[in-house]
Image (cartoon, helix red, strand yellow):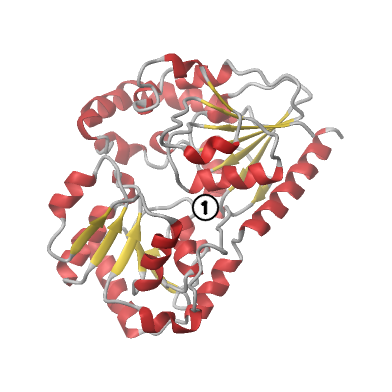
Amino acid sequence: MNVALVYDRVNKWGGAERVLLALHRIWPDAPLFTAVYDQKHAAWADVFTVRPSVLQRIPFARYVHESLALVTPIAFESFSFDGYDVVISVTSAEAKNIITKPGTVHICYCLTPTRYLWSGYEHYKSQPGLGYASHAASLGLRLFGATLRRWDEIAAQRPDYYIAISEHVKARIHTYYHRGVSEVIYPPVDTTKFVSHNLSSVQKKKQNYFLTVSRLVSYKRVDLLIQAFNELQLPLVIIGDGHQKKELQQLGGTTITFVDRHLTDSELVGYYEGCRAFVYAADEDFGLAAVEAQACGTPVIAYKESGIAEVVRDSVTGILFGSQTADAIIRAVRLFEKKTFSSAECRKQAIQMSEPRFMKEMESVVSRLVKESKL
């Protein structure tokens, strides 16, 4: 089976990039098509034959891709997939715009329907979180939002099949794209890397800080965490980078510490197993970092109307709070402090999201869908 992979843009490292590496282990010869490729900041992609679009020829396109929303769909339409049996698009934006001919099966592994056009539209319109470019981005959404939505709806009909990363995303696909989902397959977590070296002594190693690991952009709602921990006067360590970092640093009080995101996995494990709990306020599609934390024996405090609610057992491996407010987070932390959590139970919950499980499920579902397409 001749397989090609497609991804929105190859210029960073995160959860979706871990998905792509797992897909590479299943189909090592599959090339990776993308809008733009920044080799310096995406060394993980060295294992692929990366085929960027015509946008790569635009100076600085790999750094300012947010400003190219009107032309990126066209760039994906220009790719040819002649000779491929299966194309798997991994996307939260434009990669599903590809056009395949009859005989080539297009399977979309959907991270979420394009967030800034749908579930996060109102938030992005008022708080794009792009630093100096925020005003222009907000104006662009107001002027072209309806057009971009129509394009996105058209593109959403192109995949032959959808696989969602969570039940939460499955519901969004139905709501915004009016498409069915063939399967839900949770993304992979490398539970061999994200593990405490001595799980039985994790609780003894706990220090007096809470932790979040996140891109520092507006929809992640790190501002709510800072407000809550400023009032609680408890230590919060924030690992991440993004357009909102300076704004968040100004909001942070004396108990808030920022750590550069460029950590090794082993350094990140140290933070996970050393914190009292991992905290998260975003309406997350899945919540990879929450699974990594549990894999290291650490409980999670998170927003329950989120994909994270599917990977955290309330009052067993964490606490889920009901509204995206600082007050709700404060109440959840205070409740957390009254309870005891088992590191072994947290690890047991995370093991269900292992990379071998993902690879087995993905290979099986893709094979089944290809067979169905030929009936």
Image x and y of residue 5, in percent: 63, 33
**Residue at the outermost right position:** 375
Image x and y of residue 216, in percent: 30, 47
Q: Which residue is mark 1?
A: 168
- At label 1, counting other C-alpha atoms closer than 10 Å, the crowd grade (few under 14, some 14-19, many 20 or more) is many
Q: Amino acid at mark 1?
A: His
Residue drawn at (60%, 41%) of the image: 109
Q: Is residue 27 visible?
A: yes
What is the count of numbered marks?
1
Q: Relative to residue 24, is residue 195 drawn left or right? A: left
Q: Nearer the viewer, residue 145 or 357?
A: 357
Is 17 drawn above or below residue 51 in the view shown?
Answer: below
Residue drawn at (28%, 66%) of the image: 328
Residue 103 placement: quadrant: top right
Residue drawn at (42%, 73%) of the image: 299
Q: Relative to residue 184, is residue 276 drawn left or right? A: left
**In the picture, which quadrant includes the C terminus?**
top right
Q: Nearer the viewer, residue 45 or 149?
A: 45
Q: Is residue 287 visible?
A: no
**In the picture, which quadrant includes the N terminus?**
top right
Residue 210 placement: quadrant: bottom left
Image x and y of residue 341, in percent: 43, 81
Residue 180 placement: quadrant: top right
